[in-house]
Amino acid sequence: MSTNKTYAGPGDMPASLPLFPLLKALLLPRGELPLNIFEPRYLAMVDDAMKSERLIGMIQPDLEQGDALFPVGCAGRLTQIAETGDGRYLVTLTGVARFRLDSELAATTPYRRALVDFSPFAADFEPRAGEDEVDRGGLLRALRAFARSNGLQLDWDSIDSAPNEALVNALSMMSPFGAREKQALLEAPDLKRRADVLVAITEVELARGGGAAPTFLQ
């Protein structure tokens, strides 16, 4: 999904973001993440975001470190919002760029906010950067093996026609892997290495004989 606002580089991004810590939720540039918002603090966050830049920072909590967060997240722009009539919002975030967490701000809102740095991820603002370097064949072989192992029926026509960036990022976001695996996919320096990480994680899961969650790629 495209957005009505163009972000050309880190200089177009705000210095701080509201944070939505959510375990195993992965947002990547130009990816789409649907969310069901029901907690009062996050309802307030959506309301405030709609009044300003419409940007929210998706980030994973690091449960092994108490209340800490992983050091890298991804900013998403609110591109769809619907009210349900029972107090919830159904929203879609479209990924803009990753950020490195700098420091959290003193609480003046019910949700967390932090100073963030987009400069390490300037390449995120260039659509389809690095696509030619992706080992698409290796990625598809791993995906086919995973699908066979787990009895998944996939839309191979759509997969075969998808550009490399859309394919790698969609598979990464929809994968059923754990928080640290998702974080490794997020922090991969470029598209090629994200695809390589995805293949490696998939092959490890296949070697273990582990099944996928039933929502994988469906």
Image (cartoon, rainbow, N blue to C red):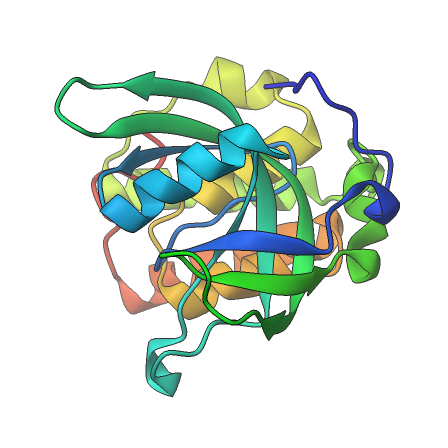
Q: Residue furthest left?
A: 86
Residue 34 in percent (x, y) is at 38, 31
| Rendered image quadrant of residue 23 | bottom left
Residue 40 in percent (x, y) is at 24, 45
Q: Looking at the image, which residue is at 78% across and 25% down?
A: 6
> 33 or 156: which is nearer to us?
33
Q: Residue furthest bottom?
A: 65
Give the mark count.
Answer: 0
Left or right: residue 39 versus residue 185 is: left
Q: Looking at the image, which residue is at 40% across and 75% down?
A: 62
Q: Looking at the image, which residue is at 34% across and 35% down?
A: 35
Q: Looking at the image, which residue is at 75% across and 53% down?
A: 190
Asked whether residue 181 is in view, the answer is yes
Asked whether residue 143 is in view, the answer is no
Q: Residue furthest front?
A: 108
Q: The N terminus appears in which quarter of the rendering?
A: top right
Left or right: residue 74 versus residue 14 is: left
> 108 or 214: which is nearer to us?
108
Residue 53 in percent (x, y) is at 64, 34
Is 137 located above or below residue 178 in the figure? above
Q: The C terminus appears in which quarter of the rendering?
A: top left
Residue 129 in percent (x, y) is at 83, 38
| Rendered image quadrant of residue 64 | bottom left
Left or right: residue 144 versus residue 116 is: left
Is 99 located above or below residue 43 in the figure? below
